[in-house]
Amino acid sequence: MFHVASHAHASKPALYAEIADLARGLLAGERDLIANAANFSALLFHSLPDLNWAGFYFFDGTELVVGPFQGKPACIRIALGRGVCGTAAQTRQTQLVADVHAFDGHIACDAASNSEIVVPLVRADGALLGVWDVDSPLAGRFDDEDRAGMEALCALFMQAVDG
Ligand code: SME
């Protein structure tokens, strides 16, 4: 049986450190992209407080296509450069959006979302795998500690599937 992190931590870095330990165990020895993406989504969605969506969009060579996730059904295809996910994919830079309603071109999949963080996933050879997208019903839910924690978790994920 696998566990999720308890929310009772002294600090965000401590919570992310525990999730990273759990992610290492969950992904160890498995390279299947869908299996790892599904379990990674479940681990983070249930370990981090105040989320309404957490999941993957994979790049199919033309656009982003929704992959394994936790949350309500979501938009299926997103063009590069569109919305927060498309911007992260195109710029290859993490997008930290305190108020999605103020983000030009934000795509509202779940009306409950008010803030969002999206991390680009790039393979060792430089190819774009896709993006990791997390939404919250709280405004300003994500800060630089979340950015650091989420980027570290995505690096573990990429190591498992691409390492
Ligand atoms: N809000 C995202 C779309 C994806 S969903 O939130 C699941 C965006 O603007 O890219």
Image (spheres, grey):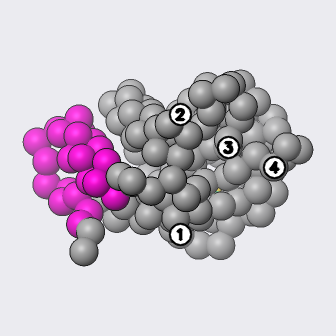
- Report the magenta residues as a range: 3-26
Please tell me which residue is depicted at 45% across the width and 56% down the height of the picture: 30
Report the residue marked by disc 3.
130
Report the residue marked by disc 4.
60
Q: Please say whether residue 21 is one of the residues in the magenta stretch.
A: yes
Do the residues under discs 3 and 1 have CB atoms within 8 angstroms? no
Of mark 4 and mark 2, the one earlier in the sequence is 4
Residue 149, relative to residue 92: is it above or below?
below
Query: What secondary structure is found at the residue carrying circle 2?
Result: strand
Quadrant assignment, res 62: top right
Q: Residue furthest right?
A: 62
Do the residues under discs 4 and 1 have CB atoms within 8 angstroms? no
Q: Amino acid at mark 3?
A: Gly
Please name which of the two marks, 4 or 1, marks the residue nearer to the observer. Answer: 4
Percent coordinates x, y for residue 8 in the rendering = 13, 54
Q: Is residue 163 visible?
A: yes
Residue 71 is tagged as 1
Quadrant assignment, res 141: top left
Report the residue marked by disc 2.
96
Q: Amino acid at mark 2?
A: Leu
Relative placement, left or right, of 120 versus 28 is right
Residue 153, relative to residue 92: is it above or below?
below
Q: Residues within 10 Å of mark 2 (few under 14, many from 20)?
A: many
Relative placement, left or right, of 37 versus 62 is left
Quadrant assignment, res 152: top left
Query: What secondary structure is found at the residue carrying circle 3?
Result: strand
Classify mark 1 as within 8 Å of ligand 1 or not, answering yes or no: yes
